[in-house]
Image (spheres, grey):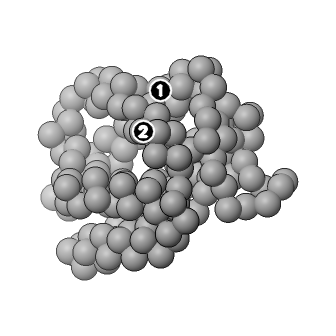
Amino acid sequence: MILGFQVVWFACAWGASHHYPLLPIIVSLAYLNTYISKQVQKKQAYLFLLKMLALGFLLDSILGFSKLISFASAYPEPFAFLQPWWLSLLWLCFAASAKVSFSWLENRQYVAVLLGALTGPIAYYSGVQLGAILQIQALGYVLLSAGWAGTMFILIRFIRKQASHIQ
């Protein structure tokens, strides 16, 4: 699942920036299908994915609306600030990889927050380098760091909650 998410990330960022829209769609849907097919409690899995999608959509769209991040968007004005569709797919796949990728952080919430604060902005910077994100202002990186710290805090809580429902 971890390597698969890296493939999804590259397919989404590269495919979106090089005008190959089917690449992110096909790779993401295959990844999500694999995730869902392995879930015993499918309803819980879908709810988890939707919660993480909403969180990501809110974070990215607020940064886009405030002009701190500029996406290579497929949306016309006045909707260009919204999180691009390919980034929504990426958030869904990130959520799908979470339990496997971050279960070791389940009892290390502060480490998860620190990792989110450090690696979240790096992922977005990589998106800039690939051309999927046009520009990020300096304050945007600071807010991405804070947003990803919060995202990891929430993500670990979701993982704990799911684990307690299974036991």
Label 1 neighbour load within 10 Å: few <14, some 14-19, many 20+? many
**How far apart are labels 2 and 1 at the CA level?**
14 Å
Residue toward you, 35 or 46: 35
The correct choice, above or below, for 9 with respect to 116 in the image is below
As drawn, the residue found furthest toward the front would be 18
Rendered location of residue 164, percent (x, y) = 23, 52
To which quarter of the image does residue 66 belong? top right
**Foreground disc of the pair 2, 1:** 2
**In the rendered structure, which disc, 2 or 1, sits on the residue that comes first in sequence?**
2
Q: x, y (%) of residue 135? A: 61, 35
Q: Residue at x 27, y 46 (%)?
A: 160
Picture residue at 50% right of the left edge, 69% below the top = 20
Q: Quadrant of residue 41?
A: bottom left
Query: Which residue is painted at 47% across and 75% down in the image?
Result: 22
Secondary structure found at label 1? helix
- Mark 2, other Cα within 10 Å: few <14 / some 14–19 / many ≥20: some
- At label 2, the amino acid type is Ser
At label 1, the amino acid type is Ser
Q: Is residue 48 above or below residue 153?
A: below
Dot 2 lies on which element? helix
Question: Quick check: 142 left or right of 153?
Answer: right
Identify which residue, 104 or 72, lies in the foreground.
72
Name which residue lies at 63% across and 26% down.
Answer: 137
The answer to whether residue 9 is visible is yes
| Viewport quadrant of the C terminus | bottom left
Residue 83: percent from left, percent from top: 62, 52
Question: Which quarter shows the N terminus?
Answer: bottom left
In terms of depth relative to the viewer, which is nearer, 166 or 95?
A: 95
Residue under numbered circle 1: 145
Give the residue at mark 2: 126
